[in-house]
Image (tube, helix red, strand yellow):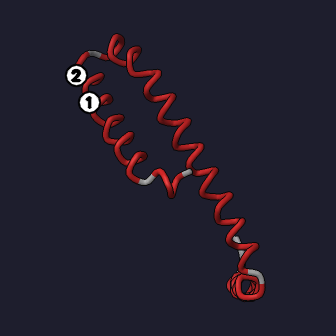
Amino acid sequence: MLSQEDQRRFEQITRHLRESDPRFFARLDSRIKGRRGRYMMLLTIVLWASLPAMTVLVGRLAGAICAVVLVANAAVMWRFRRRLL
């Protein structure tokens, strides 16, 4: 955790870098978005793969709830696919 003075200096440095080299921050931002999208896709795949086991082990109701959540997740990922990937 940074002290308030260090946090202020850090924000000042990042603000200066953002103003002086916007291409650097654009590249950095796109890398972060790509990572977030990959993690979201990996999580979705793992959850879809575990759906049959969850249905068998926990019950049909839990499987149905999980399936509804995953369908909603897929819809959200499809809607925001440009931002995530």
Instruction: Tell me the quarter of the picture where residue 71 sits.
Output: top left
Instruction: Tell me the quarter of the picture where residue 25 sits.
Output: bottom right
Residue type beneath disc 1: Ile
Outermost residue on the front side: it is 82
Q: Secondary structure at mark 1?
A: helix
Q: Secondary structure at mark 2?
A: helix
Which residue occupies 56% across, 48% down? 37
Residue 39, image x, y percentages: 58, 43
Other-residue count near label 2 (Cα within 10 Å), few / some / many at <14 / 14–19 / ≥20 = few
Which residue occupies 28% across, 24% down? 62
Residue 31 tag number: none
Outermost residue on the top side: it is 56
From mark 2 to mark 1, how far is it between C-alphas?
6 Å
Q: Which residue is mark 1?
A: 65
Left or right of 25? Residue 64 is left
Residue 85, image x, y percentages: 56, 50
Say which of 8 and 50 sits in front: 50
Which residue occupies 32% across, 16% down? 55
Say which of 75 and 36 sits in front: 75
Q: Which residue is mark 2?
A: 61
Left or right of 66? Residue 16 is right
Instruction: Tell me the quarter of the picture where residue 60 sits.
Output: top left
Other-residue count near label 1 (Cα within 10 Å), few / some / many at <14 / 14–19 / ≥20 = few
Residue 24, image x, y percentages: 76, 73
